[in-house]
Amino acid sequence: MKFHPDVEEQTNVYSKKMLLNTLFYGPSGSGKHTLAMNLLKQLFGVLGKPNEYVDEVLGIKYAVTSKYIMIDGYEWKQSKVSIAKCIEELTQTQHVFTGLYKVIYIRYIDVLFDSHQTLRQLIEDTYNECRYIFTSRSIDNIDPSLVSRCITMRVPAPSIEILSNWIKEKFEIDNDVSELIAIHSQKNANLCYHMAALYKETGVVENMNYIFAKVIYDKVTTTTSLGEIHELAEKYFRCNAHLAPILREYLKLVPFEKRKQNLYYIELYVSRKSKSIFDLLYLLMGLTKTMNIEAE
């Protein structure tokens, strides 16, 4: 089932001529990655299974096929080597052949804001050799000069009806159940899929907010590693989960005598209009501090 046949049709039209630098943007679970992969299939046919590598020198993990190189923005963010250096090394060492140019696919470009100017310059410098595909949760978080070098494709969240029909067909479940799951999925296809898979296994439509809250509670009450807290913050920030209902479920798990301290950090986080990953990290560190005094 196609979530966005109109967007896919737009990409099909211009991909028949040549690949242009393309930016797909929209909320988590809207289908950006699927559209990017469909674009590559339109261009090159069968893509083959990507091989994953870890480059210890560059400090990044990436995937490669004979048609493209794919890098996760979160992986790149942790690299100590500049983006320009990374792409230069990868395009020189990886045998990616498409006939005219090498394709670099970067997911979550929005988390690399500090590198957008460098990427813009890189697009210009490598125009005769490379084409770029980007995905982002918002176009507002991308430098306008970088956006101007791309064809932009807005990918809205799929409708409840589309999600319901999708999981009903995929998991062979009743219409009423599939609709209930789609409603609780917050129009996030990834979340919807996992909820349907869990229902198929247990026969119960789980409260995913409670499940996410339990993950947070278990982590902040047991970990002594800030690295684990940072990893958890990235995971929740990446999936763009609505944390307000999750935090309400979390508070129900907290012993009464510790709720006031927890509530302080939660209210501080909720009050922020524009929430960054650093705000989420501060929240989780605060919860860890109140629940696990040994965390370092």
Image (tube, rainbow, N blue to C red):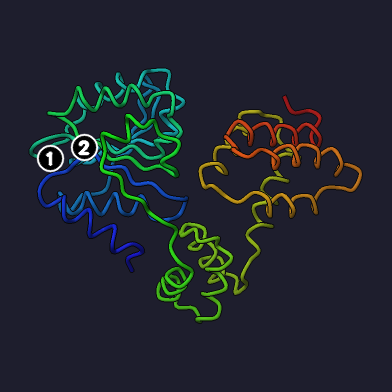
Q: Out of 70 and 100, give the one closest to the viewer.
A: 100
Residue 203 spot, x, y in % from top left: 60, 74
Quadrant in which the C terminus is drawn: top right
- Vertical relation: 198 (above or below) 218: below
> Mark 1 falls on what kind of element?
loop
The residue depicted at 40 percent of the width and 75 percent of the height is 169
Name the residue carrying label 1: 98
- Vertical relation: 93 (above or below) 108: above
The residue depicted at 49 percent of the width and 69 percent of the height is 160
Name the residue carrying label 2: 103
Q: Out of 135 and 149, give the one closest to the viewer.
A: 149
Q: Out of 94 and 244, give the one closest to the viewer.
A: 244
Drawn side of residue 176 relative to residue 119, left or right? right
Measured in 3D between alpha carbons, the distance from the residue under mark 1 to the one under mark 2, in whole angstroms, is: 8 Å
Question: What is the three-letter code of the residue carrying label 2?
Answer: Val
- Vertical relation: 228 (above or below) 1: above
Drawn side of residue 210 relative to residue 251, left or right? left
| Residue 147: quadrant of the picture | top left
- Mark 2 is surrounded, within 10 Å at the Cα level, by few (under 14), some (14 to 19) or many (20 or more) other residues, namely many
Residue 103 spot, x, y in % from top left: 21, 37
Quadrant in which the N terminus is drawn: bottom left
Residue 289 spot, x, y in % from top left: 78, 31
* Badge 1 vs badge 2, beta-carbon distance below 8 Å: yes
Question: What is the three-letter code of the residue carrying label 1?
Answer: Thr
Drawn side of residue 168 relative to residue 185, left or right? left
Residue 275 spot, x, y in % from top left: 60, 38
The residue depicted at 26 percent of the width and 48 percent of the height is 49
- Vertical relation: 106 (above or below) 127: below
The residue depicted at 32 percent of the width and 31 percent of the height is 146
Q: Closer to the N terminus: mark 1 or mark 2?
A: 1
> Mark 2 falls on what kind of element?
strand
How many numbered marks does the figure carry?
2
